[in-house]
Image (cartoon, grey):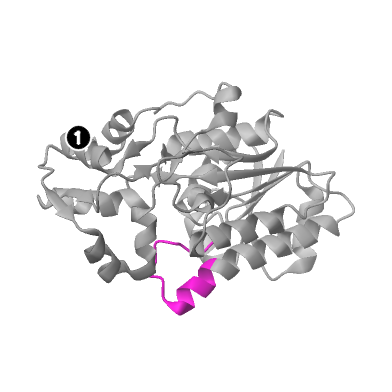
Amino acid sequence: MNILLFGATGNIGRKLAKNLVDKNYIVTNVSRDINKSKTLLPFISNHLNLDDDDSLRSFIQESDVVVNLAGFPVSEKWTKKNKQLIYDSRIKTTRRIVELINSSSRKPKKFISSSAIGYYGNGREHLLTIDSPPGIGFLANVCIDWEEEAQKVDESVTLIIPRIGIVLDKTSGALPKMVKPFKYYVGGKLGSGKQWMSWIHIDDLINAFVEFIETDNYEGILNAVAPNPVRNSEFSKILAKVLNRPNIFVVPSFILKLLLGEAATMVLNSQKVFPEKLIQNDFEFKYPTLEKALKDLLK
């Protein structure tokens, strides 16, 4: 099977690419930086430039599945420039992929285009499913437009849009930033601590993507999160327990807003998300609970 990845130089993409190569799939990555792609993904044979339309169209016609993971990190400070990069790297890239697929004489069987639970905005105490309405704010608007571009793909192509939660990985993303204050004995809850956090262990996320590729059980929008969301106060409590550190400090909401500005919504918004399609398809979570996930990642 031929897999064409966009944005595989990110942490999720690197691990997915390695998993697929180990399964003897033919994997090609598309990147703006070929040298970076070759350095981070030495185990794959093909590296394409995002601006090379002819090569891209040729590889799309030979691909069975196209996976879109492209996107400038939302964890970077939300300056005006970075907000534009966050938006353009998702919407414009997805638009371009869809245009290439739709104009190809032979189309892939599947197009897997990532999104995020930021779609829901601040869900407060509501249980959020794929039928829940979109939220408001910058990230919600990005996700809405992101998904709309993906949904323009030709109807002959099976479209899968996973709304990804907080990805827990020991080397990148949110977890190392969460761990740091605890290691210095100043860890604790953020804001009121009542906000819900919907997370997923990186290994479970990769296994979910492999299922999307290998089975015909999935189509449309789904929530890629673990089945047991926790409040921020509970997350802090479990993290402190795993690290054997105190959990006594509180970072008030107004401090977070002063430090992070608009980006504070990422840690203050409440998102209690349910992975209904993964549950319905009997997806086997290796790490269904937060304590099990953190013990694995921080051991």
The number of discs equals: 1
- Residue carrying label 1: 242
Which residue shows up at 66% across the image and 36% down it?
213
User: Residue 216 magenta-drawn?
Assistant: no
Please say if 13 is above or below 286.
Answer: below
> In the rendering, at what x and y percent does residue 238 appear?
22, 35
User: Quarter of the image containing the N terminus?
Assistant: top right
- Residue 210 percent location from the top left of the image: 59, 35
Q: Which residues are magenta?
A: 70-86
- On screen, residue 290 versus residue 167, left or right, reads left
Q: Quadrant of residue 158?
A: top right
Q: Quadrant of residue 264?
A: bottom left
Residue at x 11% of width, y 52% of height: 186
Residue 114's place in the image compared with 97, above or below, is above
Can you name the residue that lies furthest to the bottom here?
81
Residue 168 in view (yes/no): yes
Q: Position of residue 265 (x, y in %)?
A: 38, 59
Viewer-closest of 284 and 143: 143
Residue at the extreme right = 105
Compared across the picture, whether 168 is left or right of 37 comes to: left
The kind of residue on which mark 1 rests is: Val
User: Which residue does the image show at 29% across and 66% down from the upper left?
Assistant: 257
Taking the spot 73% from the left edge, 52% from the top edge, the residue there is 151
Q: Is residue 76 magenta?
A: yes
- Residue farthest toward the top in the current orientation of the protein: 282
- Is residue 172 at least partly visible in the picture? no
